[in-house]
Image: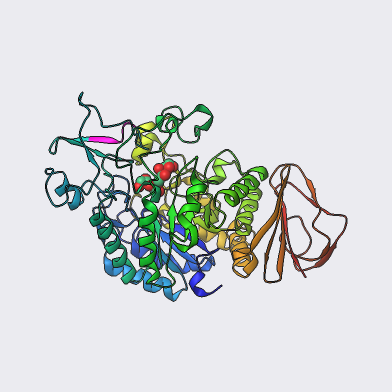
Amino acid sequence: DTDLDWWRGGVIYQIYPRSFQDSSGDGIGDLNGITERLPYVASLGVDGIWISPFFTSPMRDFGYDVSDYRDVDPMFGTLEDFDLLVATAHRLGLRVMIDLVLSHSSDLHPWFQESRMNRHNDKADWYVWADPKPDGTPPNNWLSIFGGTAWHWDPRRLQYYLHNFLSTQPDLNFHNIDVQNALLDITRFWLDRGVDGFRLDTINFYFADKHLRDNPALPPEKRNASIAPAVNPYNHQEHLYSKTQPENLLFLKRFRELLDEYPGTAAVGEVGDAQYGLKILGDYTREGQGVHMCYAFEFLSGDGMKASRVVETFERLEREAPDGWACWALSNHDVTRHVTRWNLDDQGARCYATLMQCLRGSLCLYQGEELGLTEARVAYEDLRDPYGIEFWPEYVGRDGCRTPMVWEASNLNGGFSRAKPWLPVCPEHLGRAVGLQEHRENAILHHYRRVIAMRAGSPALRSGTQSEMTAEGDLLHFIREKGGERWFCAFNLGGEAVSVHPPEGEWSFVEGVGGTDPGRAITIGGGMRLGPWHYTLLRSV
Ligand code: TEU
């Protein structure tokens, strides 16, 4: 691998800027706060960071609604602060990926303000506008992820506009080449400012069907029960026409050509699609013609990550995206933190942390994951996420994974801010603050550092082949291999002890719990025993 390929198998640390570190004293995190904490991030051994949106925004969706793509929201700082952040990151050997939300803008973006004036202005065709049906109802049956119809009536223009998310997030019309060009210009603006890449929000939503055809109903067996099933009819529709149109491949090709002008940059496209996610991943990352990797949702939901599920996912990936490249994650700013979601104890959390470092693909870690943070309970009065407020209490929203980072247990607000934080610091998190864990030899934070370093130092784990992946009950094992380096990785993803029989040969024990001493060469004959949530990693000698 060359330096240019850093993204392939790289580990990316996701920062949610509102909640990482406040330097200005307004209770909201900011860019200078991130810069201050970059040495900590570098100390984890990750390859780079992805910063969730910090652009000018009315913050209806906390930055995922952009009103100026070329500036920093004053709440987060200035462009000069951003330049300092990038320079500091680069000095520390960290790549910087920023989060471009191109599928939709804020309704306060000047483009939309102009577009809504009438049907013949310069930007008239920049968003997805449509006439009502004769009875005045929306043009078709498309639904918004955040609830209700995906169409909003505009009383000024006397038409509906499309919004796949909030009504304050109108969808841009990618069929219009001027829109594409404007978005590519924005991308170039940030490339010229020195970023190393992009996390592209909702790339499978860029294009909607030109003819605005109705989506078909989803047969019951294909419904996704993971997102507010009781209240959200979104899960009962097959989103055939409201997203993932074939024209996107041509746009992504243009996007890739632009990135290729800046060697060493990379893009990870977010593809949220319960049915076709991996198939889309294959299409969007094929032959270096689209994004470098797709952010996959496979391990972000569900009630567990059983051995059989891991095997099934990689079999499906192999089938549906043979030369695709996935970027995995267990947690992010949209979902319940996995320690809570899967009800993991410390041992279980360490086991999954290690497993993720051993799997083929790239990997995103979400701030606080390295501390073993649980989902915070947020009282109704404190909820900020519009999605949560809409569906509470059936679905409590995304605030519980967005509460502030905890740095020092004894400092005000865990060291996050000297003012009242925008979301309360979770009291249970304080016992896991960075400062405390730094001094605890056995803390999960050090475990993360160790396994991240292990992957970083191994071409086989970073980008080698993955074969013989097998599930036997709760036991998961597989081989990673590259250039003569061969690993056997085995995990007990359950509460009962299991036996594992590594392939015959001389192995050296690398890492594990309840296993042999690290570094000791062992000959495998009779097999090894793995206690609950124990694992063993062996390298051939
Ligand atoms: O999320 C896209 C996405 O698929 C989400 O709708 C996700 O399914 C949802 O948050 C429930 O978990 C991206 C961003 O990550 C999210 O924060 C934004 O709200 C959304 O796009 C709109 O920009």
In the image, residue 288 lies at what x, y percent?
47, 63
Give whichever of 89, 170 is nearer the camera. 170
Residue 484 left/right relative to 368: right
Residue at screen point 88% across, 55% down: 526
Give, as a single range, the part of the protein colored magenta: 148-152
Residue 439 left/right relative to 30: right
Residue 277 left/right relative to 119: right
Quadrant containing the N terminus in the rendered view: bottom right
Residue 85 sits above or below residue 297 on the image: below
Residue 385 sits above or below residue 481 on the image: above
In the image, residue 38 lies at what x, y percent?
44, 67
Residue 112 sits above or below residue 229 on the image: below
The quarter of the picture where residue 28 lies is: bottom left
Give whichever of 104, 41 is nearer the camera. 104
Residue 168 left/right relative to 508: left
In the image, residue 261 lies at what x, y percent?
37, 72
Q: Quadrant of ligand 1?
A: top left
Residue with the most extreme right position: 526
Magenta run includes residue 150: yes
Q: Number of marks in the image?
A: 0
The quarter of the picture where residue 99 lies is: bottom left
Residue 321 showing in the rendered view: yes
Residue 232 showing in the rendered view: no
Q: How is the image coloured?
A: rainbow
Residue at screen point 44% across, 61% down: 289
In the image, residue 132 lies at what x, y percent?
21, 31
The secondary structure that dominates the magenta segment is: loop
Residue 212 sits above or below residue 110 on the image: above
Residue at screen point 22% across, 28% down: 133
Quadrant containing the C terminus in the rendered view: bottom right
The quarter of the picture where residue 414 lies is: bottom left
